[in-house]
Image (cartoon, helix red, strand yellow):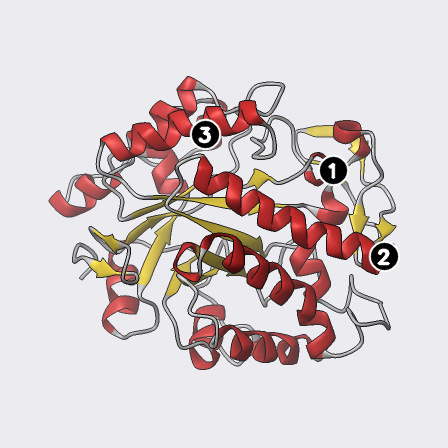
């Protein structure tokens, strides 16, 4: 089943049900412009049903890692056009994952204090830059939030201009949108906090603004209700995601994507795996992610747990992962040394 086509919607049909998960690689240049090496990297993986790009910064104060590509300047758009052209020449389909890291950003990159739903500091330091400790973020005003919504929509427009077939809004893994969705980081008592409806408001405003900008068939969302990365769960968080997913059912998105590194274990307060939880509450296309191999991917597809299955690290180690899986060829094992290479 893994290698059968899948009709994502009226405008996009995927060649197979394999998805390349977004993988932060930090290989953009110092202006956050995608490079020729990145174009070659993505093109080598074009036989994948759907490629989701590495998380892409939507405005300068959203940067939380060194050399992560942006999509807010003309040079960055031109760089991405080379990437998307290379993928399309090989017959591939690629979405851009647009990203603001919120409290996980750092003033080192933009000169601006990080922005977040509440002034709750993230413990630890910036990945790959351990001398930079996280800062106390500025609590976004409602005016700030309105500006952020516009910037997400502009990033979606820029992505389509760059040649992407669609966009995935990064609403997972403890970054900005996820910070609004979870009570640990959202201490607000205004229209954007204090209830499931209010905590979901920013995510829904962003999704709707992006739909208005580029069309629902080109908009997707990644979510991680488990709060396992950069966040801790709080009792009642699940209610926010039940509300949010029910609202998303009305919007005809391209898909919702599970944001997990490991989705093999049940989460107590979600009454099962994250994919099971989302499937119970969301009626549209669901991409599973988190520890798949060929057997477990086929099992989830056959049991209708998910519609598509995303692989991450195996794609770093195997640019020809789809062909290898299809032919039964042994895979190259992933190791951390491969993170310093772009093959």
Judged from the image, the secondary structure of the residue bearing numbered disc 3 is: helix
| Residue on which the image places disc 3 | 80
156 vs 173, nearest the viewer: 156
Which residue lies at the image location 87% right of the left edge and 46% below the top edge?
136
310 vs 83, nearest the viewer: 83
Which quadrant, please, contains the C terminus? top left
Q: How many marks?
A: 3
Is residue 234 visible in the rendered image? The answer is: no
Residue at the extreme left = 327
Q: Position of residue 37 (x, y in %)?
A: 41, 19
Question: CB of mark 3 within 8 Å of CB of mark 2?
Answer: no
Judged from the image, the secondary structure of the residue bearing numbered disc 1 is: helix
Which residue lies at the image location 18% right of the left edge and 57% below the top edge?
5
Answer above or below: position of 325 versus 304.
above
Is residue 37 visible in the rendered image? The answer is: yes
Answer above or below: position of 24 versus 145.
above
Q: Position of residue 32 (x, y in %)?
A: 59, 25
């Amino acid at each position: 089943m893994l290698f059968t086509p899948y009709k994502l919607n009226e405008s996009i049909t995927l060649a197979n049900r394999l998805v390349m998960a977004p993988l932060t690689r930090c290989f953009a240049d110092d202006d956050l412009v995608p490079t020729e090496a990145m174009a070659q990297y993505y093109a080598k993986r074009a036989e994948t049903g759907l490629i989701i790009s590495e998380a892409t910064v939507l405005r300068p104060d959203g940067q939380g890692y060194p050399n992560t590509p942006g999509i807010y300047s003309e040079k960055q758009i031109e760089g991405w056009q080379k990437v998307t052209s290379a993928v399309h020449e090989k017959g591939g389909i690629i979405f851009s994952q647009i990203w603001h890291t919120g409290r996980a950003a750092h003033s080192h990159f933009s000169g601006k204090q990080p922005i977040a739903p509440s002034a709750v500091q993230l413990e630890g330091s910036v990945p790959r830059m351990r001398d930079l400790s996280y800062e106390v973020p500025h609590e976004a005003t409602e005016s700030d939030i309105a500006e952020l919504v516009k910037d997400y929509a502009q990033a979606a427009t820029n992505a389509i201009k760059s040649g992407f077939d669609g966009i995935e809004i990064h609403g997972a893994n403890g970054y900005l949108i996820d910070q609004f969705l979870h009570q640990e980081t959202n201490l607000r008592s205004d229209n954007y906090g204090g209830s499931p409806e209010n905590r979901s408001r920013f995510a829904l405003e962003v999704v709707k603004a992006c739909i208005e900008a580029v069309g629902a068939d080109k908009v997707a969302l990644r979510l991680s209700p488990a709060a396992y990365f950069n966040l801790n769960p709080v009792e009642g968080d699940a209610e926010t995601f039940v509300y949010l997913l029910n609202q998303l059912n009305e919007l005809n998105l391209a898909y919702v994507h599970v944001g997990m590194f490991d989705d093999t274990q049940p989460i107590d307060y979600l009454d099962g795996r994250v994919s099971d939880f989302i499937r119970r509450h969301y009626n549209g296309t669901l991409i599973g992610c988190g520890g798949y191999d060929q057997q477990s991917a086929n099992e989830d597809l056959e049991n209708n747990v998910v519609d598509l299955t995303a692989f991450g690290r195996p794609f770093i180690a195997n640019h020809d992962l789809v062909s290898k899986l299809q032919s039964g060829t042994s895979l190259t094992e992933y190791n951390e040394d491969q993170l310093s290479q772009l093959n």
